[in-house]
Image (spheres, rainbow, N blue to C red):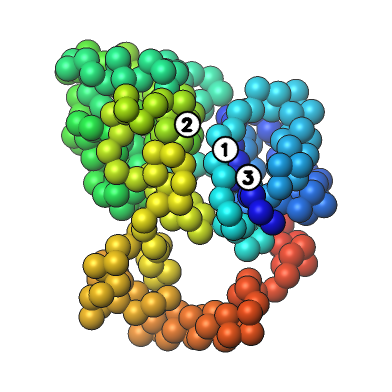
Amino acid sequence: MSEVVVAALYKFAALPDYEKMREPLLDVCIEAGTRGTLLLAAEGINGTIAGTRHAVDTVLDWLHQDERLAGLEHKESLDTEMPFYRMKVKLKKEIVTMGVSGVDPNERVGTYVKPQDWNKLVDDPSVLLIDTRNEYEVGIGTFRGALDPHTTSFREFPAYVREQLEPGKYDKVAMFCTGGIRCEKASAFMLKEGFEEVFHLEGGILKYLEDVPEEETRWEGECFVFDNRVSVNHRLESGSYDQCYGCRRPITEEDKASSLYEKGVACPACFDTLSAERQARFSERQRQVELAAARDEPHIGAPPPQRQRVGSNGS
């Protein structure tokens, strides 16, 4: 496979029959030859798939046939290697987990801002710019002047807003995330909390990097992505970071030189937090990975689709 198309997609849409959609969608993905993970919930669809141009288009065309997903958009990048090991379609309560009842982006969200208009908005000194991603994502790249809520999961974002921000104190609030989904849901939450002028970057950071010339960028650093590439640069090429498989955080060559780093097991950020049981489990996993590599085989566990058809929750 000389060129792999990586497509990140999501759409908030009322899908009361989402459980019944799982098997047909998984069949289409497997037959087309894509790999990746898609999440289905009553509130919509979210995920990333990768494959040949034809394979990705086949899955997107199938999704677009559902009138509820007709407006589904996606962001693309290219890679020289397949960034996923298998294809999964999972059933979830939320396609992005906030854990707050009554927040429905299908009913009301903030104002979408096109990537081409983003610079003008964030250059306005009266705008409070918030990065809705997790701390480890913010740490390798963000928009200039953005506020870091220092969250470890999106579930912590509502508490941060309620404890640290005050409706009426800011003229405008602008938010962003990797592909647009978290900031869209965050905008629905903030409107519910009483913030009046709420904006969010349409298509997220990935769409901004795709559409805005590098010489005009307000982006600094690399963008964390949830696949084997770990991060991408402004040209949407694989970035300079590796990943710790103990905590999934991005790591640098300096991190890997640390005495607290063990390949496939732990890094300086998580070394002291892993139980002996987990360290032993991760060590065995890494041993299996290295054995597979010695045989020139990928370490992917049980082959799809059998593995992915076990259990109704996709686990």
* Spot occupied by residue 20 in the image (x, y as percentages of width and height): 78, 44
Secondary structure category for the residue under label 1: strand
Quickly name the residue at label 1. Answer: 76
For label 3, the crowd category at 10 Å Cα-Cα, with few meaning under 14, some 14 to 19 and many 20 or more, is many
Instruction: Give the Cα separation between the discs numbered 2 and 1.
Output: 8 Å
For the point 42% across and 22% down, the residue is 115
Q: Amino acid at mark 2?
A: Glu
Amino acid type of the residue tagged 3 in the rendering: Val
Q: Residues within 10 Å of mark 2 (few under 14, many from 20)?
A: some
Crowd band around label 1 with a 10 angstrom C-alpha radius: few (<14), some (14–19), many (20+):
some
Q: CA distance from mark 1 to mark 3?
A: 7 Å
Q: Secondary structure at mark 3?
A: strand
- Residue under the image location 30 percent in, 72 percent down: 256
Q: Give the residue type that dot 1 points to.
A: Glu
Q: CA distance from mark 2 to mark 3?
A: 14 Å
- Tell whether label 1 touches label 2 (CB within 8 Å): yes
Residue lying at 44% horizontally and 84% vertically, measured from the top left: 283
User: Could you say where residue 103 lies in the image, as x and y percent from the top left?
Assistant: 46, 29
- Disc assigned to residue 27: none
Nearer-N-terminus badge (2/1):
1
Q: What label sits on residue 210 in the rendered view? A: 2
Q: Nearer the viewer, residue 57 or 13?
A: 57
**Residue at point 46% right, 46% down?**
237
Closest to the observer: 58 or 265? 58
Examine the rendered structure and indicate whether residue 135 appears above or below residue 198.
below
Of callouts 2 and 3, the N-terminal one: 3
Residue 5 — which label? 3
The picture places residue 178, in percent across and down from the top left corner, at 43, 39
